[in-house]
Structures are given as C-alpha cells and as structure tokens.
C-alpha cells in the first residue's frame, strides 16, 4: 500500500516549500468556501505532499479571517493522512528562547466565536480531544529537529488567542500563571478540525520572542518577530524534510485514524441529504452500508 499523503501548513514566513518534484497547483472549492490559497502538491523526500500557505502567499489573511474548515477539508479531499503545521509563537517560559522550536501536545482556547467543527446544521458529532495532537507525528518532528541541530522542546501547552493584536502585559502575566508554554493565534482550530477529519496533526511552534512578560527583553514588535522568523523558517524547512524521511508508511500507534468512529450521535436517517453530501469525505465511510 502506498504511503499516505502528508499535508504541510506553513505559517508566517513559510509561504512555499522549495524542491517539490512534479509540483502542481490545485485551487479547490469546498462546501465551506476556498482554502487560504492554492494547494501545491508534489513529491518531497520521496513522499507525496500537499503544501498550503496558511495566510496566503504575500500574507494576506489575518488569524481572525482564516477559513480553517476549508483548509482542513481541502487537505482531506486530497487524501492527507498527516498534517505538519508550522507556526510562529511567543515564549511564555524563560528556557524557551527565540529560535527554539516547541512541539506542543496541549492547547488552551482564548479565541472568541471561531468555527471549530465541521458539524452542526442537522448533524451532531463529538470526538475525543483530551490529547489534541498526534503523539506519533509529534515524536517524528521532535527527532527530526534534533537531527538537523535545532533546539527542540517536546510537549507543552499552546494558548491560542484571538489576535490580531499581541497580548497586554496583564494577559501575558496571567497566561504565565496558568502554566502555558507558548502563545499563538492559529493552531487550535486546525487541531480540532484535523481530529474530526481523522488526520494526524502536530505543530512545530517556532519561537520568535518572549511576548511582553519578560522584564529584561524588548517588548514584542513586528520587526523583531520577522527578523527571528526568517531564521526559524529555514530551520523548519529542514525539519520537514527530515520528518518526511522518518514518517512511517502506514499510520499506527495513535487514535487519530478512527477518531470519529463512535462520534456521530445523530441517527443516520435523520441526517439531511445536503449535509451527507457536503461531509462525504469525512463521514462517508461511517454512513455506508456494511460491506460497501
């Protein structure tokens, strides 16, 4: 059996992956609207990949404007079994320095009103989310980072704020008291939707700054973030390449591929036909008669 496709979602600064063989741009239409940009498919390090710029090439889309459902749905339609996410974050811990990379395994939601599910409008489903990232994929990213010489940290909590503004000092200090490790604006919704879509998901959180809690550092500015970001992006690309060579051909050892198996609560004959059609790539296998 062929190895599953690997989705790559690039955050701030990571707008393309060089070196893709047989690269092809695909502009998808989804029931939720268009993804952030064309998805570029091809082969990298011997694996089939699909790359999406989260904010669009040229960085045109704010965190509050992202169509998370279209982005993850698009990856699902293309056959993604894994999603590697790269995202700029601020550090909430002294030992997580700018240019370090964290592989968080928990999220805390401080967003307001973002759509974080494919369900509703006639169909109800609940999926387990106690462990919101894929442990197998997270382990691969951590080892890949060590292999390329990056300063890596495994585990930790990513607090996802609404943005687009950075935190106030009061907010930053409170988040520190809560024990979070990094702060960002995008990854929580991706993780939730990837779980519903039964895609293995993990994040490379690229530390650019100490937010505004650190008394001996300059306050976070866009200029300072961008300067570190460019270095982080080059490291992230190396990690992605190394991780692709390490990923197993078949998934196993995690609950991600069957996360939705017992999650659909709505009686099958009560699900509206239009919702069945819209969510076919995600729920279809659970609605077909046995043996088909």
Image (cartoon, helix red, strand yellow):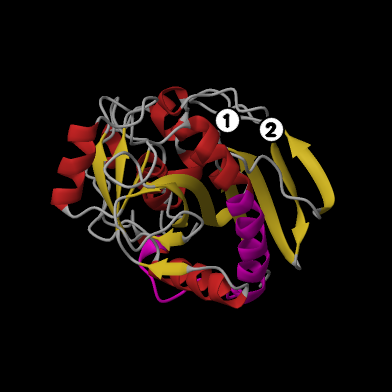
Q: Which quarter of the rendered picture does the N terminus lie within?
A: bottom right
Instruction: Using the rendered image of the protein, determine whether residue 209 is visible from the camera's viewpoint.
Output: yes
Which residue is disc 2 drawn over?
A: 38
What's the residue at 15%, 42% (across, down)? 174
Quadrant hosting residue 268: top left
**Main SS category, magenta section:** helix
Above or below, comparing residue 38 to residue 151 in the picture: above
Element under disc 1: loop
Tag shown at residue 35: 1
Q: CA distance from mark 1 to mark 2?
A: 7 Å
Tag shown at residue 265: none
Q: Position of residue 257 (x, y in %)?
A: 43, 62
Part of the protein shown in magenta: 231-256
Of 172 and 259, the residue lying toward us: 172
Q: Position of residue 197 (x, y in %)?
A: 43, 48
Callout 1–callout 2 Cβ contact below 8 Å: yes
């Amino acid at each position: 059996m062929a190895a599953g496709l690997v989705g790559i979602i690039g955050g701030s600064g990571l707008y393309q992956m060089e070196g893709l063989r047989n690269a092809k741009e695909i502009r998808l239409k989804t029931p939720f609207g268009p993804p952030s940009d064309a998805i570029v498919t091809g082969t990298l390090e011997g694996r089939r990949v699909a790359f999406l710029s989260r904010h669009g090439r040229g960085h045109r889309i704010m965190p509050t404007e992202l169509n998370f459902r279209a982005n993850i749905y698009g990856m699902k339609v293309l056959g993604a079994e894994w999603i590697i996410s790269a995202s700029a974050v601020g550090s909430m811990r002294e030992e997580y320095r700018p240019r370090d990379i964290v592989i968080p395994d928990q999220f805390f939601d401080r967003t307001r009103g973002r759509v974080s599910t494919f369900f509703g409008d006639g169909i109800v489903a609940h999926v387990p989310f106690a462990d919101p990232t894929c442990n197998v994929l997270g382990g691969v990213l951590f080892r890949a980072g060590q292999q390329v010489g990056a300063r890596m940290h495994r585990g930790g909590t990513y607090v996802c704020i609404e943005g687009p503004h950075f935190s106030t000092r009061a907010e930053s200090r409170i988040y520190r008291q809560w024990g979070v490790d990094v702060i960002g604006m995008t990854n929580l919704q991706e993780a939730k939707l990837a779980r519903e879509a039964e895609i293995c998901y993990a994040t490379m959180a690229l530390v650019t700054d100490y937010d505004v809690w650190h008394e001996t550092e300059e306050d976070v500015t866009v200029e300072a973030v961008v300067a570190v970001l460019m270095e982080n992006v080059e490291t992230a690309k190396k990690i992605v390449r190394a991780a692709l060579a390490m990923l197993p051909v078949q998934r196993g050892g995690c609950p991600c591929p069957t996360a939705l198996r017992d999650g659909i609560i709505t009686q099958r004959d009560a699900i509206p036909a239009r919702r069945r059609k819209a969510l076919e790539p995600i729920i279809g296998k659970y609605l077909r008669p046995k043996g088909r």
